[in-house]
Amino acid sequence: MRLVLVGPPGAGKGTQAQFLSLHFAIPHISTGDIFRANLKDGTPLGIEAKGYMDRGELVPDSVTNEMVRDRLTKDDLANGFLLDGFPRNVAQAEVLRAILADKKTPLDAVLELAVDTAEIVLRLSGRRVCRNCGKVWHLEFEKPANPNICDICQGELYQRDDDKEEVITRRLEVYQEQTAPIIAFYRTEGLLITMSAVGSVSDITDRAISALSRVQ
Ligand code: AP5
């Protein structure tokens, strides 16, 4: 299964990706997570990405495309992959199509998680992440016993800088202006599956698995 997950910030891509990557036994490749891991390690890539991420802007294609091209050469992709957060504009979608065409491994499906803006703002503003193990919590929908401490590893919970209100607004604009056009791109390619991503996490996972089982 070679799959792209697309949807606005906070649609639940990362949450669903964990379960889908387990179900289909494929690696979860999140460009946002790769940038954040680089930032944590203080690499030049992480430091360059931080300025864009903190403003809610896209990291330049020249940087992002090479990072993904490199990741797609690794030898853990025999069963496929789940891309989360890439592509994020039509130019990136074209680059991905070319990389996969060279490898003769085209995409099987692009799953769009549809969620309305009010729900997105609720999800992003309540999100907290464990600094130690990376577990994603939500202060209302997936509540830790203590709002500052991870139930799993007792690590400190923090709010992503780009989950502050003013940055959320910009991320939503960038999604509409730059990312939403890839929906039409993939519809034309015959790869798009759109589903509602509202409801319980497990119901959404079941819906996604059932929709994707039809393309395998
Ligand atoms: P990235 O990390 O990819 O952010 P994003 O796409 O904005 O998505 P999020 O991680 O915010 O949300 P999500 O959909 O994964 O939701 P989650 O599952 O956490 O990118 C960050 C930045 O990196 C970008 O802004 C850009 O600067 C840069 N970048 C990344 N890729 C790039 C690229 N290709 N090109 C250029 N730049 C790039 O869920 C959110 C919350 O909701 C959680 O708290 C969760 O617990 C909760 N939740 C999930 N599901 C449900 C549910 N069903 N009901 C209730 N709550 C739920």
Image (tube, grey):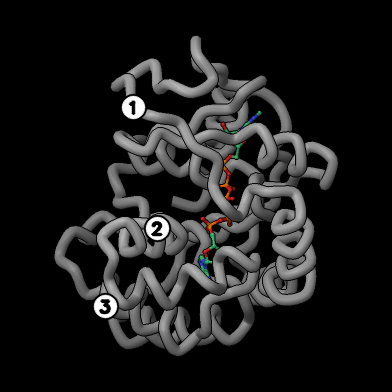
Q: Is mark 2 within 8 Å of ligand 1?
A: yes
Of labels 3 and 1, earlier in sequence is 3
Q: Which residue lies furthest to the top in this view?
A: 145
> Circle 1 sits on which residue?
155
Q: Residue at x 62, y 77 (%)?
A: 89
> Circle 3 sits on which residue?
70
- State which mark lies toward you, 2 or 1: 1
Tell me which amino acid carries mark 1: Gly
In the image: residue 128, left or right of residue 174: left
Q: Is mark 1 within 8 Å of ligand 1?
A: no
Quick one: SS at disc 1? loop
- Vertically, is 59 above or below 122? below
Q: Distance between the residues labelled 3 and 2?
A: 17 Å
Pinpoint residue 148: horizontal percent, then vertical percent.
49, 23
Quick one: SS at disc 2? helix
In the image: residue 111, left or right of residue 134: right
Pinpoint residue 82: horizontal percent, then vertical percent.
41, 55
The one of 185 and 64 positioned closer to us in this rendering: 64
Of labels 2 and 1, earlier in sequence is 2
Disc 3, disc 2: CB below 8 Å? no
Q: Is mark 3 within 8 Å of ligand 1?
A: no
Pinpoint residue 114: horizontal percent, then vertical percent.
73, 47
> Circle 2 sits on which residue?
36
Quick one: SS at disc 3? helix
In the image: residue 72, left or right of residue 82: left
Tell me which amino acid carries mark 3: Asp
Q: Distance between the residues labelled 3 and 1?
A: 31 Å
